[in-house]
Image (tube, helix red, strand yellow):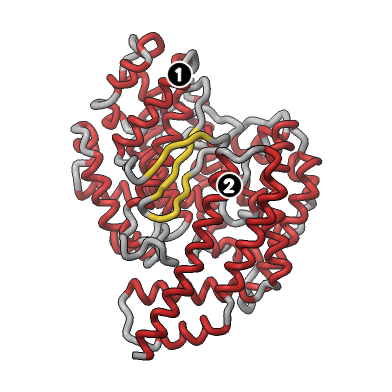
Amino acid sequence: MKERENQGRLESYLERAMAIKAALTLFEWDNETLAPQKAGAYTARIQGALSAAYQELMTDSELVDLLKERESQELSEEESAIVREAWEERRELSCIPPKEYRAYQELVSESARTWADAKKKQDFDAFAPVLEKIISYQKKFAGYQARKGQRLYDVMLDHYEKGFSMERLDEFFGILKRELVPFLQKVIQSGVDIPDDFLTGNYSEEKQRELAEFLANYVGFDFDRGVLAESAHPFTTNLHNHDVRLTTHYKERVDSSLFSVIHESGHGIYELGIGDQLTLTLVGQGASMGMHESQSRFFENIIGRNEAFWIPVYGKLQELFPQQLGKVDREDFVRAVNKVQPGLIRTEADELTYSLHVMVRYELEKMLIEDNLDVRKLPEMWADKYEEYLGVRPEHPAEGVLQDIHWAQGSFGYFPSYALGSAFAAQIYQFMRKNMDFEGLLRQGEVDVIRQVLNRHIHRFGKVRDSRRLLMDMTGEDFKSQYYVEYLKEKYGKLYGVEV
């Protein structure tokens, strides 16, 4: 009887914790979509109070006793994972002084608005003092959380992708630098010109919105359990697997929103696919940011930029935009949306150059955390690295160091997961090609079959299993970066007639 009573008390603790997190998620969604400009400082205080309540709940001494008792019992894989995550969450929160934790949460809640204003005015100096404060907090917290001998940036990386330390990421990005930077030069020097002027023009927002909803639905996003809104920076969030929220933006260039929607739908489909028994628990989310990104990049690129995908649906685009695309062949459209064109903006990057954008951020983050790089030097160093790897140089901070919101939100260690996600997706694609007629399914409009395979091997497990375990269980192999390099070289070597 007492055992069942204590189990109920533990569930009550964790239920309250998830309710607070859901409330914080709603505020974050509101801040990016509907909140008035002058709400920031006041709303930040509410978010700070909720964050403090969450920390207090997860560090309560009674929770320790309840977790100890629970882990002494015979548990299922899911129950063990929930206990594991509760211990980990408690360990990370209990070492941070409550006053510092709340002050930091209020800082990052308000800093996003400071960043947005600085970006709009192309004024890095206006954001630099706030960024310095965030980095100071990040390093202090990482110092509290570090295990014996663990480096600060490795602590931060562990928050987003366990098992991928600087040592492992240095190896991964080293391969990308060695293989993809010279390959990109070959592509650029090939002389192949792919027209894409028809992608820019008078694409009305109304028709783009109709296309966005059509494509999200087509790839499997369930609008009975999800919504699509607008924001400056497209993102996905959720309260649980029956309330998943996507955003996109609408620009002159139609493929910007088009692929943003397919990308965010990939994130959303992952969250929708998490088992009902896991949602609203500490494991009711994606396995990691890298695995989450693998699903969005898989839908955006491996499905969405695949020529076979457009066979059943290109007619819909021509129907919506007869003036712009009515006389454009499907093959020319697919070539255009796969065009390699080194640019300055990560979120607009082509598939081949995308991870080079991420590599710049990884290298600078390491220097900020491990080498105490002066924040004021960031714009120049950012520009130098873009020129070295991509052959382009930003003219002002808004198209350079200020383009991403992540550092304003305190998300240090997040960026590498974007490149890892692309590499995970390539490994999953290689496995699927060996075991099913992948392109045949796309030609027939049967995206649901591919989605069901992803759900069976990845989505339904939530955070019960980590990324490397999921890859191993699905493909029979640990993570191998070679699949990503081979995928890109095969695809773009063929498109540009470049020998690999």
Depth check, front residue: 197 or 479? 197
Is the residue marked by circle 1 packed among few (<14), some (14-19), or many (20+) residues within 10 Å? Answer: some
Is the residue marked by circle 2 packed among few (<14), some (14-19), or many (20+) residues within 10 Å? Answer: many
- Residue 232 in view (yes/no): yes
The residue drawn where x is 32% and y is 74% is 77
- Say which amino acid is labelled 1: Leu
Q: Compared with residue 116, is residue 6 higher up or lower down, i.e. above or below?
A: below
**Residue to which mark 1 is pinned:** 199
Residue 398 position, x and y percent, is: 69, 33
Whether residue 51 sits left or right of residue 471 in the image: it is: right
- Say which amino acid is labelled 2: Met
Of pointers 2 and 1, the one earlier in the residue sequence: 1
The residue drawn where x is 45% and y is 23% is 254
Depth check, front residue: 97 or 147? 97
- Label 2 with label 1: CB-CB less than 8 Å: no
Q: Which SS class for mark 1?
A: helix
Q: Which mark is residue 359?
A: 2
Whether residue 284 sits left or right of residue 388 in the image: it is: left
